[in-house]
Amino acid sequence: MVYKKLKNMNQQTTLNKYFKIKTNSFKEMDTNRKKKCNLSITKTPIKSPKLTLENEHVVDLISDDDDDEGSISSKTCELNQSQTSSSESTLIYTPEMLHKFPVNQSPFGEISNKSSMSPSSDQKSLNKSSPSFRSPSTSHKYFSPTKKRSIKVRTPTKAKRNLSDIISKCDKQNIFNNEEFHQASNNLDDSTIFLLKIIYQFLCDDNLKPLLEESSCSLLSRAMKVKKPGMRLVCRLYWQQEGWRRWDKVKKIMIGKFKVDDPTLHEAINSLIESGFITVANTNNGEEIYFDELLKMLKQDELKLICKEFKIKTTKKDDAVQSLKNFCSQKTNITNYFAGSKSTNETRVLNLLRSKVGPCYKLSDEARNTLKELYILMYLGMDYSIIKEKRLELMLLNDKTKRETFPICKDMEIDNASLVFKNREQFLSYVNAGVLYEDIKEATDLSEKCEKIKRVYDLYNEMSKEELMSYIKLPVWLRRYTPAYIYVKILEAGIQELKKSKVEKNILLAVDILSTLLKQTAFREHKRAEWYSEKALILDKLLFLPEKAAEVLLEGFNSNLPEKYLDFIRPRAKLLANRQTSPISSALKVQLLSRADKYDILEKNIKAVHIYKQPMYNGGRGKIKFETRTADGMLVQEAEEYCKYHYIQEGKYTHGGHWEGSIVTTIFFLLFWDIIYAQLEGVRGIYLSYYQTYPLDMFCEGFYNNRKALIEKRLKEIEESTTEEILTKIETAWESRPETEQSGVWRGAGGAGGEAARAVAARLAPARVARVCARLAADFAHAHSGFPDLTLWNERTGEIAFVEVKTDSDKPSMKQIQWMHYMQQHGIDTEFCYVGVHTGRARSRNTHELEEH
C-alpha cells in the first residue's frame, strides 16, 4: 500500500514537471508571438539592459489597411516607451536622435511643472515671468519625417500618452478596471486601440454617459468583452464605405497582419453579432439582401458562372449584370411550368445569387450611429472636418509618430463635452443641426436649398426662450457647439441663395432673416455690421426701397458697434447718400453723410504705386499672370510674384516674400506662445481636445479678455527689449517647436520661415513689433486676415515695407484697408501696388509712378 502511494506520488511529480515545462514552453511561444505582433500603444516591458540600450522607443511601421474599399491608406506605428517620461527614441527609418527633456518640464517652460499642476499655479507662474520671456521648452534634437535632416527642437518627445495615466484619473468605481482595459486592447492595432481608448474614457466619465442613449451606453460597455480581433472589424467597417461584406472580406479585415486561425475568427464574429455590433444576412435568421447589393459583391468570374447556369452568354461584368436584369423581367419558361416549378425567374436568380455570395456582414445601424455620436462627443474641440472627411485615424497615427503634432500639452488637464451639453436633448439637437448644415451645404438644387433654409428659419424661431438662455449662458467660445449657433450660420449663408432665386417671397424671407439675426446679440456678433449692410442692399437694389435702406444703415450706426465694424457700413451709406437717381430724402442724406464723412480709413488715403504692364491673356479663367523677360529667359508670374520681382529689380529692396499675414502671425505666436496656450485660472472650456490647433477662445473677444493682464505685460516687455533680445526669443521659440506642429507658426510651403521672421522683426524693431502684435492680440479673429500680400526689406538700409497688390479687376477689402491704415498710423511703411493697363481708377491716390516698358 505504501509502495503504491509512493509510486503514484512519483507519477504525479513527473506529470507536474511535464506540464510545467509545457506551460513554460507555451508561454514563451505566446510571448514571442506577442512581441512580434504587438501594435499596442501601451508600454512594452523591457526584458534586459541590452534591449533597453538598443531597442528603446523603436517605432514599428506596420500597415493597418488591409481592405481596399474606402479605407484610409496609412502606416501604423508602435512606440515602446521606457519607464521614464523622457528618454532616447529611435524611428527605425531615421538615424538615432537624442531626446533630453526634464521630467518636470512642460512645453510652456515656466507655465507648469507637472501635469497635475492646478490652473491657479499656472497663472501665478505666468504673472511672475521676467522680461526675458519664457522659452517654450528645452532644446533637443527632432527629426523631420518630411526632410532628411535633424533639427533642434525644444519640446517633450513623449510619443504617446501613457494609458495608465488616463486610467488612474478615472473614477475608482468604474465598470472596468485597468487590467480589463489592457486585456481588451492588448495585441491590437493602433486604430482599434484609439477607438477602445475613447470608449473606455466615455464609460469612465459619469458626466458623459447621460449624453448618449442607454442602449448606446450598453452597446459600448460590451465592446471591452468582444472576442479579439472583433473590435478591429468594427473600427474598420465604421471608417469604410457602408455596405455588406462577404465572409472572405470580413476575414481579411479581422486578420490584418496577424496570424489568426478560423475558429478564433468565428468566435469573434459571433461575439460581435451577439453584442449587437454586426448585422448578418443570407443565413437562416439573418436579413435578406436583394438584387443590386448582391451583384455588387460578386466578381466577374462568379457572374459568368451564374449566367452560364441560366444559359446566358456574356463576356463583361456590366453585360452580365444587364443580362441578369433582363432575364429576371422575363416570364417563366413554359418548360418549368410543366416540370412543376412555380418559381419566377427573379426568384431563381436571387436564390442562386444568395447561395453564391454566402453569409454577409455589416455594421449594425445602432453601432454606426453610436460610434458617430461617440466620435463627435470625444473629439469635440478639434476641427470637425477631420472626422467628417474620415482623416481622424490618419491624424492620430501621425500625431503618435510625430508627423503631425499639436500644441496642446498632453499633460494638461482639459475639459470635455460635458461642460457644453447638460443632457441628451442638447447634444442630440447639436448633432441634428450639424447634419442639417452639411445637408444644405451639399444640396445642388437652388429651390430645394431655399426650402431647407426656410425650414431652418422656422426651427430657429421655434426654440423657446429657456432653450436659448441655456445656450447664451455658455461662454462665447462654446456657443459654437449649440444648434442656435449653427442655425444662425446656415441662415447667414442662406441669404445669398435666397437672392439668387430672384423669387419675391425668397427675397422677402431674406429680409426677415436679416431682421431676426440683428435682433439677437448672442451668436456671430462680429457679422452684425455686414448684416446691416446686406439688408440695406436688398431693400435698395432688389425691393427698390431706398428710404428703408437708409433707415437700416442709420440703425446700424446707432447700434453701438465698434468703429472697426462701422467701417463696413460707411461705404454703402456714402453711395446711397450721394446717389443721383432715385435719391433719398435730404434729411436722411444729411444724417448718413454725417456718419460716413467720419470715414477716413479709405483706399485713397494710402500711398499707391502704379506699374503699367500688359497681362497675359487668360481667357477669363484663373489668376492674371504677367510675362517678364530676364537674362535666364522668360518668366511667367502671378501678380504678387511679378511685383516682388519688379521691386527688387528696381533696387529699393533686396529681399521679400509673398506671405500675406503668415509673417506677422508667426512672429506673434513665437513671442506669445506661452500666453496663447496657457491654462488660465477660472477659465473653462478653452481646451476640449488635445488635438486643437488653437485654444477655443482664439477667434472671439474672449481671447484678449481672458489674458488681458498677461498680454499687456508682454507687450511692455517687447517694447523695452533690444532688437537682439527680440531676435533671440524668436529664434529660441522657433527651434523649440516641432517642425510638424499645427499652430499659428506657419512652416508649410510658401510660409514665412524662422529666418524671415527674424529678418522682419529686426527691421521693424521692438516698438513696431509690439504694435503689430497688439492688434493681433486685441482681436485675432478680425486681424488675422487682411494683411498686405508682400513683405519687402533692404538688408543694407534696413528699410521695410508691406505692399498690397491689386490688378485692374481687384479692389481691396475693408480688412486690408484697416491693416494698412493701422500701420501708417504707427510709422510702418505700407502701400498699394496697382499692376495692369487700366489703373486710372486709382490715379488720384498716386504719390509717384513706376513704368514698365
Image (cartoon, grey):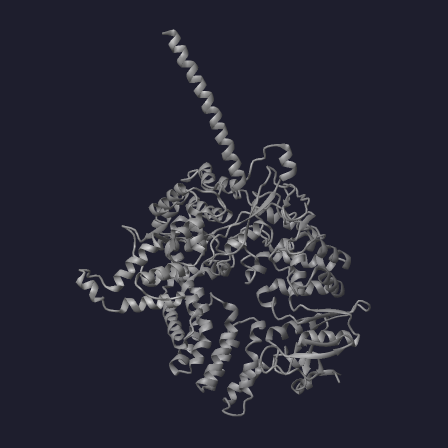
Residue 351 x/y as whole percent? 28, 58
Looking at the picture, does residue 382 appear above or below residue 571? above
Q: Toward the viewer: 92 or 10?
A: 10
Residue 378 x/y as whole percent? 46, 52
Left or right, 345 with respect to 199, comes to: left
Q: Toward the viewer: 694 or 721?
A: 694
Looking at the picture, does residue 263 appear above or below residue 65? above
Looking at the rendered image, the quarter that the C terminus falls into is: bottom right
Left or right, 364 with respect to 811, comes to: left
Quarter of the figure with residue 173: top left
Q: Is residue 558 visible?
A: no
Left or right, 52 with respect to 451, comes to: right
Looking at the rendered image, the quarter that the N terminus falls into is: top left
Quarter of the figure with residue 758: bottom right
Q: Is residue 586 visible?
A: yes
Tell me what residue is drawn at x 44 percent, y 57 percent. 240
Q: Toward the viewer: 323 or 494?
A: 323
Residue 71 x/y as whole percent? 48, 56
Identity of the residue furthest to the top in this view:
2
Left or right, 433 with respect to 707, comes to: left
Tell me what residue is drawn at x 55 percent, y 38 percent. 44
Number of on-image labels: 0
Tell me what residue is drawn at x 40 percent, y 40 percent. 175
Identity of the residue furthest to the bottom in this view:
581
Residue 793 x/y as whole percent? 76, 69
Quarter of the figure with residue 609: bottom right
Q: Toward the viewer: 685 or 169?
A: 169
